[in-house]
Image (spheres, helix red, strand yellow):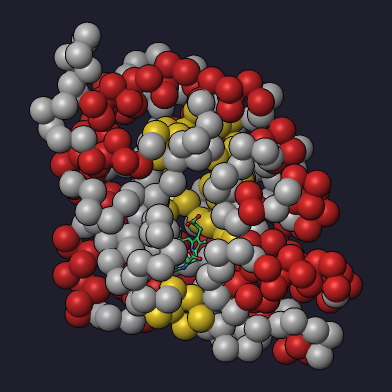
Amino acid sequence: SLSDVEPLLVRAAKSLPVERPPAWMMRQARSISRRSPYDRAGRYMKEYRDLAVKYPSFRERSENTDLIVEITLQPWRAFQPDGVILFSDILTPLPAIGIPFEIDDYKGPILDQPIRDAEGLKSLHELDLDMLPFVGEALTELRKEVGDSAAVLGFVGAPWTLATYIVEGGSSSTYKTIKSMAMTEPDTLHAILSAVADAVGTYVGYQIDAGAQCVQIFDSWGGQLPPHMWEVWSKPYIQRVVDKVRASHPGTPLTLYANGSGGLLERMATTGVDCIGLDWTIDMEDGRRRVGDKAVQGNVDPAVLFAPPEARSSITLIPAVEKAVQDVCAKAGPVGHILNLGHGVLVGTPEENVKAFFDAAKKIRY
Ligand code: CP3
């Protein structure tokens, strides 16, 4: 059958039988303190840090096909994960709908023309894919490089999460501008979210056409909303993305991730996606139960990867990283689990512990 040739990760996302858990990791990690600089964000690999010295602009690194391919393949060459995530950003498509942005090493994303009223809406236009050739080219190239050995993963921001940047003008710790807008200018905010949802739906289709085999939707700041507000301001727009993708690309699995999603899990499971990404603050057993028949992804605490190599479980003497992998896989069970951290790899994580994580995944047999 066709599914026999699908990569392990795609099979797990669809809750099809697998012989072991597929594993991948994301390199983006938000600093715990919002005030601390982003100058080393996501840069746990020396090879990447060296390349970033040569190409200091994140926009250049993430918008040049050769650099995207090279950076995407760095962790794949070093650790042989089962998924390779495109080196890009959730904000990458924004210029193609009329919203320019920059990435500041210290402040993170900066958008000079935030949209806060009906007048601002005029700058928005339909997604112009001609402005994003490097994304399609890189995905196609990556499929050739990686072959059947791993799945190529695309990703997008959920409309609500993208709107936080579009309205706030950058990163936020309180989201008070956009939350105020929900009360004072609800029609304008709904209009932004509708336009963004249509663009994101088109963008997911473009990524799949170019080679993405599974696409993750990051509603990173969905957990900042009270659940009843998430129902109004995030969920319908995620569903709009999912519906659009299902209509054009029914076979490609979709994963939905939110930071701090403890109040949202059952709700996330009703968006129509295949797989729910869990952060590390949810017990895998509880998370698995709460999302019903959806596949789950996660959710080892990224801090576990700081364990010194000699740290072992006192009873079994199994090294700490391997034990964390075994425990989460036991709790998730053999069907519909993609092994991952609960978020990205933290700055300063020893590379040998990333390797230990993947080695532990490959030792498991169902
Ligand atoms: O953190 C999440 O929940 C993931 C979703 C997300 C991404 N980008 C995906 C991503 C979010 C919320 C962003 C916005 C963004 N872009 C931030 C966070 C700002 C905030 O509000 O906290 C930052 C710092 C950027 C810029 C950026 N993008 C950096 C610094 C990096 C890491 C690489 C580097 O040069 O240091 C990225 C790459 C990135 N962003 C990836 C993803 C999935 C690539 C993943 C990978 O290569 O593994």
| Spot occupied by residue 152 in the image (x, y as percentages of width and height) | 44, 51
Q: Quadrant of ligand 1?
A: bottom left
Point out the image quarter for the N terminus. top right
| Spot occupied by residue 347 in the image (x, y as percentages of width and height) | 28, 56
Q: Quadrant of residue 8?
A: top left
Q: Quadrant of residue 266?
A: top right
The residue positioned 27% from the left and 81% from the top of the image is: 56
The residue positioned 35% from the left and 42% from the top of the image is: 302
Q: Is residue 244 above or below residue 227?
A: below
| Spot occupied by residue 298 in the image (x, y as percentages of width and height) | 46, 35
Q: Is residue 113 left or right of residue 301?
A: right
| Spot occupied by residue 229 in the image (x, y as percentages of width and height) | 79, 52
Point out the image quarter for the C terminus. top left
Residue farthest to the right?
A: 187
Residue farthest to the left?
A: 310
The residue positioned 32% from the left and 51% from the top of the image is: 346
The residue positioned 38% from the left and 20% from the top of the image is: 327
